[in-house]
Image (tube, coloured by chain):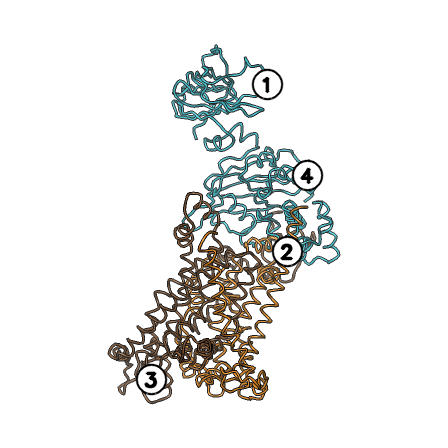
């Protein structure tokens, strides 16, 4: 509006975005650097794709990446189912006994320090194994269960807030027209929350794909996920093939996010135009 | 005819309209239905008031999962924190045990907690963690508030682009983003190289393994968590409030302090807690960027667990950390539930 | 089964008529809050029955109990002789038009309308035929493939109506059907709604807070207050013969006076009101204990202003004109009686003669016909 704010706010925005993106960009740039010393540009021999080649021949990283993809996919699918149900229950089922408990258990994981969750999950698995013999040892199953427990909390919040945007008279209308509850869910509720389910799936995938602390607690010796490999590598210092890996991941994510943003923008514009047309009818 | 049993409305039937006149029973299971209807509990209607009998079943699915995999683990941690470390697998003593003369014995050791108070390592780590989290949260707020404000006040097209730019790093690996800072902050890293090339400094500044590096790492990783709740709060503000304030003679800065800022308190609280609580227990960032002479509590816990294999002490550390965080977590939950309920 | 009797225009006057919907002693409690309190109602086939009341009076809760979204805490609801207890909304021969219309945003107009039929295992061709038919009736045939957000408010309202009617319900519930439309569209839609109702012969139960809407739409009105039905009657009945002080005050505007019954005969009553110059004489009897305290209601348009002192010994009062509001077709006067009480009087502006017009501070006599006042003790 007037005076300082006109200058201050845009400056902070610019600074903030620079702060967010300079590290990522520098990481991308140096992934094409020939030198092993990541931060010193080896002028005559760069840019090069050498580290990308090495990366794809690194069996440990490739194996870990594959394992992470498997776990993240399973986690995303299970989390979406459980989180959707929990979100639906919290948003639509009104008051019932245990609602407060459920609400608490779906918000606490959002902020719970990872070390605590990791430790608690591991101690549970150890006790369960002693008691009922399952899960035998630790590996993919235990990592997936642990990931689902915190991922589903995120999905729940997403679904719940999406449902809160819709009047529940839509569901009542469907029921009034003769649809049974299950049918109401599949014909009306589910299509309405589909966008939220998709973003919930992606978020759950990312959370699992990204997690290192909880995985470290509940992983067995034979199940090393990609973040665990990266973590042990970068603890020893920078390494150019990690830069290459990061670049690939950033590019994939950026493409996906930008594409979906464009699609969404277009849909929104078309919708706005159509609504204008309708009003002038 | 309205009283005739055959045409009574009940679940499963579509009503008398569809029945062929003359036939009393149209379906073979009709007698069964009638039998069942007579058996149905008196409070059946109260059941169906919630539209559906399947409700408790549906509720039970996520409930069971969370109780089993989220609540029970904390009870176990709490239990083990009263146990004693032994050389065994698993490396702790059972709380409940049978003595030789067949007496069920419950042994609770308070020594782990005693240990937390006597060994200054723990107290100093807790305080240090709280300090790091608090300072990082402040920086996050100082950077995040103007950004959220700028985004909320931008035009729709720009706003969407800004939001996308805020969220994009959040989708990329957290670990790799922290890693990126190592390359920047190192002694021979990008920042030092640039500053030296520009002649601002003559020898590299030590930035790695300092508090500063940890602050940067936390602010960098958690910034979206601060901006998004703030944005969704600021975006809802009615701009005519500021116009009214201006109309009543308030200068923009005053109007901001008296109107925008107080109204955005819920956003500030939510954003700050979303940064503060996980930051207290942060493990990865201080391990990669932080000091080696002063550990944060998350690292202490992990070391007790993995290096010393002292599970009971690790559990006690976790419980102590939880007690420390229980108030902020409850505030966060109340805020979150209110926010979701009032949308 | 076959109903060969010709429909009485006013079935509620016919003691032999079968009520189509019977609400018997229905109550609904939410925790300690009583939303609907011991309501009994009979609604007849082909009626447009309006539930009228302020916000929070329980009218929507009652409607939702008819639809099956809420179950009564006590009492029973019968539709066409069937007890509705325990029958979920999707099993009821009842459809509802929601206040927000609740059109499914992800389905086209035709998809929305077909939705209800698809739940009934009807053949696709038959569904398509019935959808096309009803869309023609509501004049939306050419919009069948549009999505709800591509329609204007009035069009959405008609889609909602078509969607509810296509299932040929025994009873159509309408929750503030015209509430979301602007004024001009309302009047138009109101008559359309009546036309469609007549054409299809469906029984309507309408919930509204708008008196005008209730008056013009309905065959009968049920006035609700604090969860109770306080009066049921034709629009004319509830306006001219309010059964209680609340109804008299709630419907239209009215002047209410406190008084004491001095004469209570078969053919007339006489009430002494402190605030009026003369007693009120009403030409119909009522039964109340002698000297009972009562209220007297006189509608503003039923009071005549005059400059001459009336010859009668009752049904008039003396005062000065305190305020005048000119409305075009009529003028509203606020007259301050000698007792200090202010009374509202409306007069049609029949002529433009200046000598007939009253002015500020003029002393006037207020009088009314013996058939006009309503007296009650409730």
Which one is in front in this view, the residue at disc 4 or the one at disc 2? Answer: 2
Q: Secondary structure at mark 4?
A: helix
* Chain letter for the part of the structure drawn in orange: A
Task: Where is residue B293? Give x, y as percent.
Answer: 32, 81
Residue B170 vs residue A27, the one in the foreground: A27
Instruction: Kindly identify which residue carries mark 2.
Output: A271
The chain under label 1 reads C
Instruction: Kindly identify which residue carries mark 3.
Output: B310
Q: Secondary structure at mark 1?
A: loop
Residue B223 vs residue C303, the one in the foreground: B223
At horizontal 45% and vertical 30% (from top left) the residue drawn is C245
Q: Secondary structure at mark 3?
A: loop
Task: Where is residue C298? Give x, y as percent.
Answer: 48, 24
Residue B224 vs residue B299, the one in the foreground: B224
Asked which quadrant contains residue C273, the reply is top left
Residue B178 visible to an observer of this rendering: no
Chain C: what color? cyan
Instruction: Kindly identify which residue carries mark 4.
Output: C195
CA separation in Å, label 4 and label 3: 82 Å
CA separation in Å, label 3 and label 1: 100 Å
As drawn, C37 above or below B202: above
Q: Secondary structure at mark 2?
A: helix
- Label 1, residues with CA under 10 Å away: few <14, some 14-19, many ≥20: few
Q: Is residue C57 left or right of residue C129?
A: left
User: Which label sits on residue C350?
Assistant: 1
């Amino acid at each position: 509006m007037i005076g300082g704010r006109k200058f201050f706010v845009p400056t902070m925005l610019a600074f903030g975005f620079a702060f967010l993106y300079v590290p990522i960009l520098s990481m991308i740039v140096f992934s094409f650097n020939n030198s092993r010393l990541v931060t010193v540009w080896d002028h005559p021999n760069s840019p090069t794709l050498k580290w990308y080649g090495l990366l794809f021949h690194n069996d440990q990283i490739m194996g870990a990446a594959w394992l992470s993809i498997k776990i993240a996919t399973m986690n995303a699918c299970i989390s979406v189912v459980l989180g959707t149900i929990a979100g639906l229950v919290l948003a639509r089922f009104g008051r019932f006994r245990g609602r407060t408990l459920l609400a608490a258990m779906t918000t606490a994981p959002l902020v719970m320090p990872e070390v605590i969750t990791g430790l608690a999950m591991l101690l549970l698995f150890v006790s369960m194994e002693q008691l009922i013999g399952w899960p035998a040892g630790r590996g993919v199953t235990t990592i997936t269960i642990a990931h689902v427990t915190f991922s589903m909390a995120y999905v729940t919040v997403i679904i719940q807030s999406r449902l809160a945007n819709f009047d529940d008279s839509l569901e009542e209308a469907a029921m009034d027209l003769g649809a049974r509850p299950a049918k109401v869910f599949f014909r009306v509720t589910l299509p309405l929350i589909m966008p939220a389910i998709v973003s919930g799936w992606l978020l759950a995938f990312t959370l699992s794909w990204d997690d290192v602390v909880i995985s470290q607690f509940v992983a067995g010796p034979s199940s090393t996920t990609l973040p665990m490999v990266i973590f042990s590598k970068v603890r020893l210092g920078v390494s150019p093939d990690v830069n290459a890996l990061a670049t690939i991941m950033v590019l994939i994510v950026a493409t996906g996010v930008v594409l979906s943003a464009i699609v969404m923008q277009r849909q929104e514009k078309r919708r706005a135009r159509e609504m204008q047309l309708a009003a002038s009818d | 005819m309205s009283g005739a049993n055959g045409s009574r409305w009940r679940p499963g039937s579509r009503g008398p309209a569809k029945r062929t006149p003359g036939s009393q029973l149209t379906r073979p299971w009709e007698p069964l239905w009638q039998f069942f209807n007579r058996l149905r509990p008196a409070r059946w209607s109260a059941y169906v008031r919630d539209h559906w009998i399947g409700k408790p079943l549906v509720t039970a699915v996520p409930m069971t999962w969370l109780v089993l995999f989220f609540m029970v683990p904390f009870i176990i941690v709490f239990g083990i924190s009263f146990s004693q470390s032994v050389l065994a697998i698993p490396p702790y003593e059972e709380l409940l045990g049978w003595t030789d003369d067949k007496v069920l014995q419950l042994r609770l050791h308070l020594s782990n907690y005693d240990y937390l108070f006597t060994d200054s390592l723990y107290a100093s780590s807790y305080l240090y963690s709280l300090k790091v989290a608090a300072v990082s949260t402040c920086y996050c707020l100082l950077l995040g508030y103007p950004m959220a404000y700028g985004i909320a006040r931008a035009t729709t097209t720009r706003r969407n682009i800004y939001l996308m730019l805020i969220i994009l790093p959040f989708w990329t690996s957290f670990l790799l983003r922290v890693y990126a800072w190592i390359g920047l902050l190192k002694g021979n890293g990008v920042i030092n190289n640039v500053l030296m090339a520009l002649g601002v400094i003559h020898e590299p500044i030590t930035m790695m393994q300092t508090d500063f590096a940890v602050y940067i790492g936390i602010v960098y990783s958690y910034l979206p968590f601060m901006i998004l709740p703030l944005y969704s709060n600021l975006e809802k503000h009615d701009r005519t409030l500021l116009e009214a304030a201006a109309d009543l003679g308030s200068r923009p800065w005053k109007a901001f302090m008296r109107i925008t800022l107080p109204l955005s308190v819920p956003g500030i609280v939510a954003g700050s807690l979303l940064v503060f609580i996980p930051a207290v227990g942060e493990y990865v960032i201080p391990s990669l960027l932080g000091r080696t002479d002063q550990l944060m509590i998350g690292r202490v816990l992990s070391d007790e667990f993995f290096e010393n294999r002292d599970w009971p002490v690790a559990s006690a550390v976790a419980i102590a950390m939880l007690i420390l965080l229980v108030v902020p977590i409850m505030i966060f939950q109340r805020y979150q539930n209110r926010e979701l309920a009032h949308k | 089964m076959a109903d060969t009797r010709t429909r009485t225009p006013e079935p509620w006057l016919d003691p032999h008529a079968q009520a189509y919907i019977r609400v018997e002693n229905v109550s609904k409690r939410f925790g300690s809050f009583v939303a609907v309190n011991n309501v009994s109602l009979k609604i007849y086939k082909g009626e447009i029955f309006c539930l009228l009341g302020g916000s929070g009076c329980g009218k929507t809760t009652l409607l939702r109990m008819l639809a099956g979204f809420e179950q009564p805490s006590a009492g029973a609801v019968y539709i066409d002789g069937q007890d509705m207890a325990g029958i979920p909304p999707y099993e009821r021969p009842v459809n509802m038009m929601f206040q927000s219309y609740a059109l499914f945003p992800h389905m086209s107009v035709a998809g929305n309308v077909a939705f209800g039929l698809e739940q009934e295992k009807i053949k696709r061709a038959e569904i398509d035929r019935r959808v096309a038919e009803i869309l023609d009736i509501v004049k939306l045939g050419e919009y069948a493939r549009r999505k709800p957000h591509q329609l204007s408010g009035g069009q959405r309202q008609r889609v909602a109506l078509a969607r509810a009617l296509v299932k040929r319900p025994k009873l159509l519930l309408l929750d503030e059907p015209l509430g979301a439309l602007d004024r001009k569209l309302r009047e138009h839609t109101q008559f359309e709604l009546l036309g469609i109702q007549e054409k299809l012969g469906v029984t309507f139960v309408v919930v509204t807070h708008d008196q005008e809407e209730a008056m013009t739409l309905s065959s009968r009105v049920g006035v609700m207050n604090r969860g109770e039905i306080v009066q049921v009657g034709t629009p004319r009945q509830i306006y001219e013969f309010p059964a209680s002080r609340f109804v008299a005050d709630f419907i239209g505007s009215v002047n209410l006076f406190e008084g004491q019954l001095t004469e209570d005969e078969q053919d007339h009553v006489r009430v002494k009101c402190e605030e009026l110059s003369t007693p009120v004489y009403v030409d119909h009897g009522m039964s109340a204990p002698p000297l009972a305290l009562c209220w007297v209601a006189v509608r503003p348009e039923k009071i005549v202003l005059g400059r001459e002192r009336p010859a009668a010994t009752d049904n008039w009062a003396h005062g000065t004109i305190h305020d005048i509001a000119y409305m075009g077709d009529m003028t509203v006067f606020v007259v301050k009686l000698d007792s200090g009480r202010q009374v509202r009087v409306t007069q049609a502006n029949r002529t433009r003669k200046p000598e007939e017009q009253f002015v500020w501070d003029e002393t006037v006599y207020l009088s009314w016909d013996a058939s006009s006042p309503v007296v009650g003790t409730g």
